[in-house]
Image: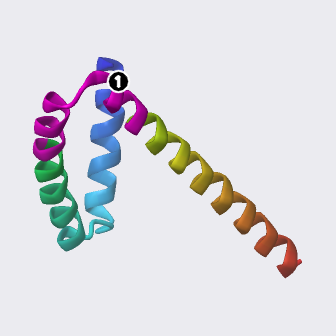
Amino acid sequence: MIFFIPTSIAAISTIFKDKLVDWKTGIAIGVAGVFGAIIGASISTQMDVNYLRRYFGFFLITITIYEIYYVVKKYILAKKKT
């Protein structure tokens, strides 16, 4: 893990230098992420472990279906353009 730190620092400095940071969106996502983590942690500590596993599994299946749909849709659109 520590081996990735110099690479991350180089990438961050390049992104800042090239002004590729959308601060408004980044701050909004960061604040929402902090509040979401706090709320999610408090909910997960009060839930039964079996329900939490089921909900997390359902979430992963939903994300997988969405990702596959998106890739297939992108592939079909690219194929139509050629």
Residue sitting farthest toward the bottom: 81
At x 47%, y 35%, the residue is 57
Q: Amino acid at mark 1?
A: Asn
Please say whether residue 43 is one of the residues in the magenta stretch: yes
Out of 17 and 33, give the one closest to the viewer: 33
The image shows residue 34 at horizontal and vertical percentages of 12, 49
Segment tinted magenta in the rendering: 38-55
Q: Circle 1 is placed at which residue position?
A: 50
Residue 62 is left or right of residue 70, and the answer is: left
Circle 1 packing at 10 Å, graded few (<14), some (14-19), many (20+), is few
Q: Is residue 35 above or below residue 76?
A: above
Residue 68 is left or right of residue 15, and the answer is: right
Q: Is residue 39 above or below residue 23?
A: above
- Report the label total: 1
Q: Is residue 52 above or below residue 74?
A: above
At x 27%, y 61%, the residue is 17
Out of 61 and 12, give the one closest to the viewer: 61
* Majority secondary structure of magenta residues: helix
Q: Is residue 21 above or below residue 58?
A: below
